[in-house]
Structure formats: C-alpha cells, structure tokens
Image (cartoon, rainbow, N blue to C red):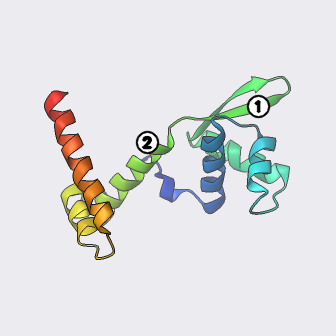
Amino acid sequence: MAEKSFDDLGELQRAVMEAVWESGEASVHRVRNLLRRRRKLAYTTVLSVMQKLERSGWLRHRAEGRSYVYLPTRTRKEASFRSVRALADRVFKGSRLLLFQHLLEDDTLSDEELAELTKMLHRRRKEKRDG
C-alpha cells in the first residue's frame, strides 16, 4: 500500500499535523488548545485523531509522566515534497517538468515571484554542480 500524502489526510488530521509541526512536539492537550482557536473539539476527538495518525505513520509518541507527547515522523517539508510528487504523478503522469511548465504559465505570477524562481533555479544549478 502506497504511503498517504498530506493531501490524503482529512481536514482535522491535517490541522493536527500542522499543530504538532508548529510545536515541534505536543501532547493532546497542547494540540487541542492550539486548535481551539478555530474550533471546539473534545479531548477524546483529538486523542483519536492523533492515535490514528500514529497508526498510519505520521506521528510517534513518548511517555512523559502519565501522558504521551507526540512527535512528527516527517517534517512539513518532507510532507510537502510527497504531496507535490503525488500531484505530478496524478496530474502530469509523473513529469516534474510539465508541472513546472504549468506553474510558469500561470498569468498571476508577479515579476517578484518570477525573479525569485530564477534565483532558485540558479541556486539549485550551483548546488548540483558543486555538490
């Protein structure tokens, strides 16, 4: 079975992952308090979501006293890469070049964004050459 991308997670699962990434590590209480800004959730709901994320490999935990502290098993950046790869596979038949071309054809890109993309390309070329 293929590993789920971040986009395959449900809305609440994504919100929990964002809260854990924001904190670096977090208890159920911490995540519930962070999410409380947007919605009211029962402790058991947050616990259930975090346990499911752990079973599916997104989180792991360590005991701290009588409670668990959950830690992400991958960074936000790693999750983003997997999502972009999944998008390229699904929509562009695996071609990262077609995905990039599609992004460049977006008429809403500002001159500043295009300049930043150019810098990123130059930086990446240099890294590949030097690395």
The x, y position of residue 108, in whole percent, is: 33, 75
Residue in the foreground of this view, choosing between 110 and 46:
110
Q: Could you tell whether 24 is left or right of 101 in the image? A: right
Q: Secondary structure at mark 2?
A: helix
Name the residue located 22 percent from the left edge and 41 percent from the top edge. 124
What residue type is disc 2 on? Answer: Glu
127 lies above or below 44: above
**Which residue in the structure is indicated by mark 1?**
68
Name the residue located 45 percent from the left edge and 43 percent from the top edge. 77
The x, y position of residue 113, in whole percent, is: 32, 61
User: Rounded to the nearest whole Å, what is the CA distance between mark 1 and mark 2?
Assistant: 24 Å
The x, y position of residue 70, in whole percent, is: 68, 35
**Which residue in the structure is indicated by mark 2?**
78
Looking at the rendered image, the quarter that the C terminus falls into is: top left
What residue type is disc 1 on? Answer: Tyr
Residue in the foreground of this view, choosing between 100 and 112:
112
103 lies above or below 94: below
Residue in the foreground of this view, choosing between 131 and 44:
131
In the image, which is nearer the foreground, mark 1 or mark 2?
Answer: 2
Name the residue located 19 percent from the left edge and 45 percent from the top edge. 122
Q: Could you tell whether 8 is left or right of 35 in the image? A: left
31 lies above or below 95: above
Residue sticking out furthest to the bottom: 107
Q: Secondary structure at mark 1?
A: strand
